[in-house]
Amino acid sequence: MAAATADPAENSVTGTLIGISHLGETIQFVVQVTPDLAVLARRPTPQAPHIAPGKRVRAFWPAERVLLFADDPTTVE
């Protein structure tokens, strides 16, 4: 997550940072992307950016780190 732009080859979303939780060795960020979609990201504390809630941010990640979950697990093939 960064206040700067991401590499266009990366998966990314832009939104507003609405929450930060310090979880010991990890910091958790909540980014509101749309009124009904928020993205949760966790970064190791030493590598976590220092961004204040309310700021516009871009969360980005490589394709190999993507996990998809079915809305209804009984429909997964």
Image: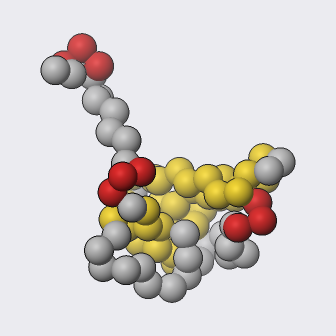
Instruction: Please count the marks in the image.
Output: 0
Q: Quadrant of the C terminus?
A: top left
Residue 64 lies, in percent from the top left, at 36, 52
Residue for point 77% across, 65% down: 46
Side (left or right) of 66 relative to 56: left
Residue 75 to residue 64: above or below: above
Residue for point 73% across, 51% down: 26
Outermost residue on the top side: it is 74
Residue 3 to residue 62: above or below: below
Q: How is the rendered protein coloured? A: secondary structure
Outermost residue on the front side: it is 64
Side (left or right) of 30 relative to 53: left
Residue 24 in sight here: yes
Residue 58 lies, in percent from the top left, at 46, 73
Residue for point 61% across, 53% down: 42
Residue 32 lies, in percent from the top left, at 48, 60
Residue 33 in sight here: no
Q: Quadrant of the N terminus?
A: bottom right
Residue 23 to residue 13: above or below: above
Outermost residue on the right side: it is 24
Outermost residue on the bottom side: it is 4
Which of the 4 quarters of the picture holds residue 3?
bottom right
- Which of 6/30 is in front? 6
Residue 34 lies, in percent from the top left, at 37, 60
